[in-house]
Amino acid sequence: MDREKKRRRQSYRVIASEIIMTLAVIVTVISLAFVVSGYWVNSDFKVERQGLLQISSVPTGAEVIIDDKAAWLQRTNTSKVLPSGKHTIKLKKDGYDSWSKTVEISEGLLYRIHYPRLFLLKREKEKILDISGTTLASVSPNREMAIMINNTTEWKLINLDREKAEINIINTSEYFSSASVAEGASVGLFGGEIISIDWAKDNSHVLFKVKNGEEIEWALIDVKNLKNSTNLTKEFGATFTDVRILDNSANSLLVVQNNNLHKIDVSGKVISAIIVDNVVSFDHFENEIAYVAKLDSEFEVGITKIGDSKLEKLETITDPAKILISKFYDDKYLTIIQNDNVNLFKEDDFSRIQEFRLSFVPEKMKVGHNGEFIIMFNGANIATLDMESTNIIEWSLGGERYGWLDDDMIYAVNGGELTVYDFDGLNHRVLASNVSDHFPVTITSDKWLYYISDDSLIREWLVEH
């Protein structure tokens, strides 16, 4: 009898333990589901729905102050659960300037801030190179190289990502009609006017648009193997009004000839049949092309894929428009600008996400880092479409001489004063004076700030060394 009672008691205990474990698993799963959905218990033991903030910085390890409250060991790069609503985020680090922004945290959603940059207050400055005679300069997409152009046919290609800058000479005399070399001369003269410069994403090629008298010519210069360079205008015996690099290595190009869009295979020296006729504007992302084409009295907005002859018509509009295709997270978007009107569409079903009216008419557009924002320019006027919040912000630079400092920051030079801004116009800081406004400014490897002053390439250290 005693043995039977012990067995029953053990069975009851086992059953009770299993019930408790099952309940614990259920409670844990429900709790995690609530946490994932943004619910949290605050200090007053009240349940409220919250969001998640992820914040990083360059350099890392900056102190994060939220709503003027600092927490022990609260540093970048980290995540923080916050109640929904507006919060002021400040970053501080000894020896560096500060950064701040007010953000809107949404219930159950993630808000990422990856772009804050803090600048060393006491920066060591050094003269790297005498560049007297340079008339134009351009920096590669990875910001590791710069090409220095002068009135001769010998240009300097400078590797910026070295303790000691490496210089290679590029002789471009064979690739431009506007270049001339006198008999017996070692260096020719370059008499063309460079209209635009565009780099391949892998930094191997540079596409030049050059005006030679009344003629326009396009040349694709291979900076890694100069012999593979080509004058596209001569090679294809055609006048192109627009040329875009299609792939990472610039072997494929998109060109507009007689208002028709074609694809060029550079190595195969082949130009395709017409992809889109009567094209007004176009943009591409990977193998997709978004376009605006002229019809009889209207304009067609559509998309197509490289190698696919089918055009997918999305909408008919009454006025010409600029178009931009971009990707944010896993979704693709189309931005269409008609005069001062901006419309943002989701590409898969062409549903309108937002519509904005600007105070100016944009002339240029640029997609930011990982598609997280879209910038629209006209002179010193800028509009930033933040894809995280799908809000648009208008702001103005101190001058019309500007460029990209890195993937997320814009610089402007006005009266020799170098000022930097976040992509949304916030956190503007003056970094240097006596800076030339005719040459680019850039940051390389998060270690060096480069600019030109008094015909010299100047480098400032952004980190202690």
Image: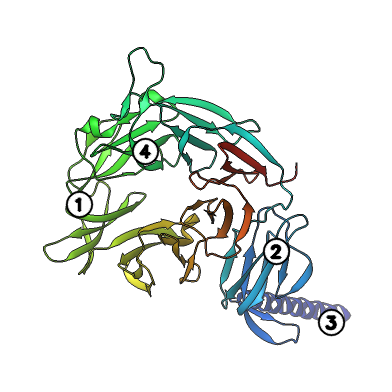
- Determine the CA span between mark 1 and mark 4: 23 Å
N-terminal of the pair, mark 4 or mark 3, is: 3
Crowd rating for badge 1 (residues with CA inside 10 Å; few <14, some 14–19, many 20+):
many
* Left or right: residue 354 compared with residue 254: right
- Tell which circle, 1 or 3, labels the residue nearer the N-terminal end: 3
In this picture, is 226 found above or below 452? above
Disc nearer the start of the sequence (1/2): 2
**Disc 1 residue type?**
Val
Q: Nearer the viewer, mark 2 or mark 3?
A: 2
**Could you tell me which residue is drawn at 24 percent across and 60 percent down?**
302
Closer mark to the observer between disc 4 and disc 3: 4
Residue drawn at the location 61% of the way across and 63% of the way down: 427
Is any part of residue 29 visible from this angle? no
Q: Position of residue 280 (x, y in %)?
A: 23, 56
Identify residue type, mark 2.
Answer: Leu
Q: Residue at x 36, y 38 (%)?
A: 207
User: Which numbered marker is on residue 207?
Assistant: 4
Q: Residue furthest right?
A: 2
Q: Quick one: SS at disc 2?
A: strand
Q: Amino acid at mark 4?
A: Leu
Q: Which residue lies under the disc numbered 1?
A: 276
